[in-house]
Amino acid sequence: MSPYKYSTLAVHAGQHPDPQTGAVNVPVYLSSTFELTGIGTDKGWDYSRAGNPTRDRLETALAALEGGTSGHAFASGMAAISALVAMLRAGDHVVCSHNVYAGTVRLFNQIVSHYGIDIEYVDTSNLDAVAAAIRPNTKLIHIETPSNPLMVLSDIAAISEIAHAKGVEVSVDNTFMSPVLQSPLALGADIVMHSTTKYLNGHSDGIGGALIGSKPEHKERFLLVQKAAGAILSPFECYLVLRGIKTMPLRIKQHEENGRAVAEYLAAHPKVSRLAYPGLKSHQQYELAVKQQKGFGSMLSFDIGTREAAGRFLGAMKIFLNAESLGGVESLASHSATTTHAALSDAEREAAGITQGTIRLSIGIEDKEDLIADLEQALAAV
Ligand SMILES: *Cc1c(COP(=O)(O)O)cnc(C)c1O
């Protein structure tokens, strides 16, 4: 455990000055290969797929921020999830939250299942369903909480307890909360996954992903996947995430304040139904959100009725951009059915509760009064 508090860690973990020059910023080591010091000896690096000094710094920061034993940076969030399941074998069984990121479902159904790995989707907000789904060959329970876009929570501590009693590991996609607002490893999970594209980078200028492990065997496993499968994050992208991390706690404060203000505004609007934001007392799992999260974040969704209404609303927005993704400084609005969840069949979307009127908002760090005024005029256009 680090003796430092969070904002200090964000600025300093892995980000000490360059020992050679004193440069305060982590240098971007654009080198594919490294000169060896002899036969079989080196200065810590030999080839950048296996390890790169800039990436090492980011991985140190990621491990510190999640309280893990090792961090591993990948070329995208999807590459990180691919690495998570890369060490499974034919015949293994995975339990996955039924309303995870649609890209995860696409990866599992269209690629991973072809390797003889059996993936079962379960409503992980229901602990009995989780317990009932575990089989003798279950190796992993992969959950995402809160879920996208309906903000359904899964109880990380309770699921970890159920899983560990049966010798099963738990991985948590912590992208929606960021490391600032939720610490899955402290709650008992084994592995944390992030799309660093979102809050960790925070500026919508790079794609990246990460796994953070809690045991030495995770380090061994994920280092092997980085080296053997090769979907590593480039040094420059590592630098962008390191830069983003320094201001992440500060950004998250503003994201949060704005998220709450927007949710309260929308909750009272007659054209808005099924508003999903865990920070509202009316959210079915408000108590769990208070217990397991350190805040409520800045993601929310609601139903505006029809696809036509959604189109008019998105077309009328002036500050919010009609774009997928989340976690950047700018506020985004998106039509879930045709963007983030377009990969799902109509039946899968319906089962997940995503309608043609579902709008997802990622609240940025602009002034909340401007954001609310923008929502007001766009809702008036519907
Ligand atoms: C964006 C996202 C991913 C995928 O990450 P990429 O960086 O786009 O590959 C996975 N999970 C969640 C929750 C996401 O929001």
Image: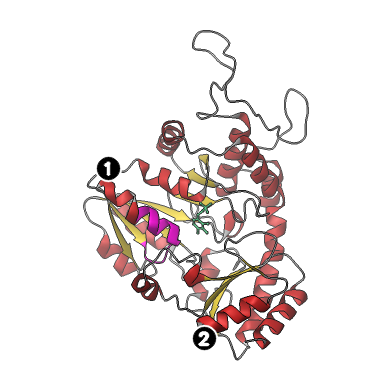
Task: Give the quarter of the figure containing the N terminus.
Answer: top right
Find the residue positioned furthest to the bottom. Answer: 270
Q: Position of residue 144 (x, y in %)?
A: 45, 61
What label sits on residue 305 in the rendered view? 2
Judging from the image, the colouring scheme is secondary structure
Q: Is mark 2 within 8 Å of ligand 1?
A: no
> Which quadrant would the C terminus be assigned to in this image?
bottom right
* Residue type pointed to by label 2: Gly
Instruction: Tell which tag, 2 or 1, sits nearer the viewer.
Output: 2
Is mark 2 in CB contact (under 8 Å) with mark 1? no
Q: Mark 2 falls on what kind of element?
A: loop
Q: What is the magenta range?
A: 97-108
Q: Viewer-proximal residue, 160 or 279?
A: 279
Identified at 29% across, 63% down, the residue is: 131
Query: Which is nearer the eye, 8 or 85?
Result: 85
Foreground: 176 or 106? 106
Q: Does the magenta stretch include residue 245?
A: no
Q: Position of residue 98 (x, y in %)?
A: 37, 65
Residue 258 locus on image (x, y percent): 69, 71
Query: Tag 1 or tag 2, which sits nearer the N-term?
Result: 1
Measured in 3D between alpha carbons, the distance from the residue under mark 2 to the one under mark 1, in whole angstroms, is: 44 Å
Above or below 246: residue 101: below
User: Which residue is labeled 1 in the image?
Assistant: 89
Q: Which residue is drawn at 46% across and 45% down?
A: 79
- Mark 2 residue crowding within 10 angstroms, few (<14) / some (14–19) / many (20+): some
At which x and y percent is residue 3?
Answer: 64, 44
Measured along the vertical axis of the image, is residue 185 above or below residue 41? below
Q: Can residue 274 be seen in this view?
A: no
Which picture quadrant has residue 143?
A: bottom left
Task: Using a 10 Å C-alpha cutoff, classify the residue at mark 1 as few (fewer than 14 neighbours), some (14 to 19) or many (20 or more).
Answer: few
**Residue 98, magenta (yes or no):** yes
Can you tell which mark lies on residue 274? none
